[in-house]
Amino acid sequence: MNVRARRSELATPASNDWMFAKAAASGADLVFLDLEDACAPAEREAARAKAADGLRNLDWGRATRAIRMNGVDTRWAHGDVIEVVTHAREALDVIIVPKVRRARDVWWVDVLLTQLEQTLGLTKRIALEVLIEETEGLEHVGEIARSSPRLEAVIFGAGDFSASQGARVDTNFDPVVDYPGDMWHYARARVVVAARSAGIDAIDAPFPNYRDPEAYRAAAERAAAMGYVGKWAIHPSQIEPANQVFAPTPEEIAQAQKTVAAYREAEATGRGATGLDGMLVDAAHLRLADNITRRAELLGLSQGSPS
Ligand code: GLV
Ligand code: MG
């Protein structure tokens, strides 16, 4: 069950503990302290204790507290999980697993966590999110998305994915030529279909160009239109646009309530469809409205239900 808001997922290098307080107060739905690629390899082991201390000692407010561990094919993976979970205990909500290629990568983390939770007597289960950023991971995204009851979200990682695919992109992971359409549409579509099929969230990729908030917003809007419920923020300035774009607007919420009311009224008189403001309303519209209402409830934006 995915019950967390994750409109914005803020990345913060776990080696840079002077940045943690600002991250904790940033307004991001989820903050992850990154033990992987934002940390220099020489810093990665020392960063574990910094991350655990930061998670325990700071006030994170409503933010979900996460780390990104190193990939399961690296020498750091088991130490990341054991050290941070042992010291942070219940102050850690989510572990992001990068460069997942197969379901077995997720099982490996799941088994390790189960043993740790039992040994440490933890009172709550640590959840997982996975990054799909290897072509092999995209090939297996369906099985990966269903690989563990801990798994709450699948994230599309356009940066490493570009490298894995051998794509020729600029530093914002955009194609170096005038590519017709969205070069990453296929990958994004597969990720969101796999996530939704498994009943979990799809989260969109990082956007390195933090000086172009309009382009960030446009990318977030396109992802939201496809069914993504959030996007990474690699800079605090990207949090607010993500929080706005991935929340239903008051107009959408009001329209959803009108749709449900119209459908229920039709249903009460034995009809399966009706008209509303010159537009057909049927069971598919009810499902769409339900999506909006659920998101509004999750984000605390509900305006009361229609009578
Ligand atoms: C994220 O980790 C990416 O590679 O895009
Ligand atoms: Mg990556």
Image (spheres, rainbow, N blue to C red):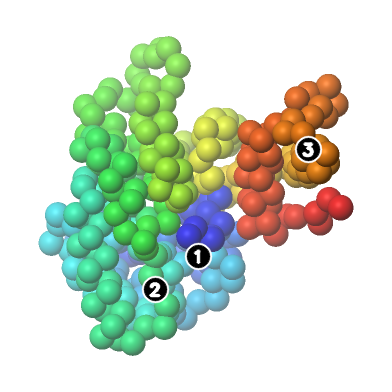
Earlier along the polypeptide chain: callout 2 or callout 3? 2
For image coordinates 23% across by 29% down, the residue present is 165
For image coordinates 52% across by 46% down, the residue present is 230
Q: Tell me if I can see residue 235 in this picture.
A: no
| Residues at circles 3 and 1 in contact by the CB criterion of under 8 Å | no
Residue 163 % position (x, y): 24, 33
Q: Is residue 84 above or below residue 252?
A: below
Q: Tell me if I can see residue 277 in this picture.
A: yes
Residue at mark 3 to residue at mark 1: CA–CA distance: 45 Å
Residue at mark 1 to residue at mark 2: CA–CA distance: 13 Å
Residue 243 % position (x, y): 62, 49
Q: Residues within 10 Å of mark 2 (few under 14, many from 20)?
A: some
Please tell me whether mark 2 sits on a helix, a strand or a loop.
loop
Residue 61 % position (x, y): 59, 71
Q: Which residue is mark 3?
A: 270
Circle 2 or circle 3, nearest the eye: 3
Q: Is residue 37 above or below residue 272?
A: below
The type of residue carrying mark 2 is Arg
Q: Is residue 69 above or below residue 248?
A: below
Q: Residues within 10 Å of mark 3 (few under 14, many from 20)?
A: few
For image coordinates 21% across by 27% down, the residue present is 166
Q: Is residue 189 above or below residue 56?
A: above
Q: Which residue is mark 1?
A: 64
Earlier along the polypeptide chain: callout 1 or callout 2? 1
Residue at mark 2 to residue at mark 3: CA–CA distance: 45 Å
Q: Which residue is mark 2?
A: 125
Q: Residues within 10 Å of mark 1 (few under 14, many from 20)?
A: many
| Residues at circles 1 and 2 in contact by the CB criterion of under 8 Å | no
Circle 1 or circle 2, nearest the eye: 2
